[in-house]
Image: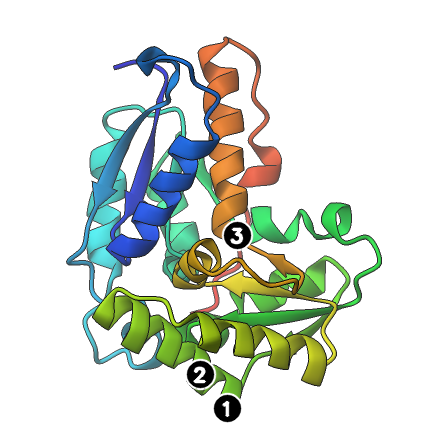
Amino acid sequence: MEDFFTVIGGMGTPATNSYIRLLTARTPAHQDQDYLNYILVNHATVPDRTSYILDHSQPSFYPALLADIKQQAALKPDFMVIICNTAHYFYRELAAAAGDIPLLHMPHVAVGTLAKRFPQAKKIGLIATAGTMADHIYEREIEDAGYDVVLGNGPIQDQVTELIYRDIKEQNKVDATLYHTILREMIDEKGCDLVVLGCTELSLAQEKASDHEYPIIDPQSIIVDESIRLATAIRAGEPVDYTPLVKINDPLSH
């Protein structure tokens, strides 16, 4: 297969399925051959990312993802994308293992859209897994872009964890009321101008419960659009600039 990319997913599977659904729905296609070429690695048995980040005595998810990256790099895709924000904890190591295959950096790409989509925004709210919060990956990206960060911590983090783990991961369902409550608390009570959904399960919640008016940045939705843009340009033989989509000097936080 030529002109293809690799999707490293399965963390978790419902969130990865959301990426694939959006990818299919947004691809301009009128026949089978118009859709995109890609390999989906749905590695569902990758150890929990947050468990390891918060407690290094727990199984590390790095060896599994490293094996996936090396395996896929040998197939020479045009680029790779990891459908899990928390997994970017090991981005620098995984990007190095990918060699000359660009590994898109979902948090970096998402935060890069802030000024264009919300030019007046100053206070950026962040909700994510406890692991992503502890890693500070989005916090650094938002601050480096010149914004103030408002963390969804304390009781809000408890609600976010409940939505991600109890509802979506354990029961494969989205509690729309809980999701909307979290957004309301971030916007109305914490005074955020918008909220970044720093977990792909939260992106799934947005897909399933988008009937609200709260301003958000959805990194998975953004990376879907970037995947389509890149794959379409590659198929057409157009030059592609990966510079804004990767982080060559991503700092180690661990």
Badge 2 marks a residue whose secondary structure is helix
Q: Are discs 1 and 2 less than 8 Å apart at CB?
A: yes
Residue highlighted by disc 3: 219
Give the x, y percent position of residue 207. 45, 53
Q: Quadrant of the N terminus?
A: top left
On screen, residue 187 versus residue 21, left or right, reads: right
Secondary structure under the numbered disc 1 in the rendered image: helix
Q: Position of residue 78 (x, y in %)?
A: 39, 24
* Residue located at (34% from left, 54% from top): 15
For the residue pair 7 and 170, the one nearer the viewer reads as 170
Residue flagged by tag 2: what amino acid is it?
Gln
Crowd tier of the residue under label 2, counting other residues whose Cα lies within 10 Å: few below 14, some 14–19, many 20 or above: some
Q: Residue at x 39, y 14 (%)?
A: 34
The residue drawn where x is 27% and y is 41% is: 69
Which of 162 and 254 lies nearest the eye of the viewer?
162
Name the spot of residue 87 as percent of width and height, x first.
36, 59
Q: Quadrant of the C terminus?
A: bottom left
Spatial CA distance of label 3 from label 2 is: 20 Å
Q: Residue furthest front?
A: 211
**Callout 3: helix, strand or loop?**
helix
Residue that badge 1 annotates: 155
Within 10 Å of the Cα at label 3, are there few (<14), some (14-19), or many (20+) other Cα atoms?
many
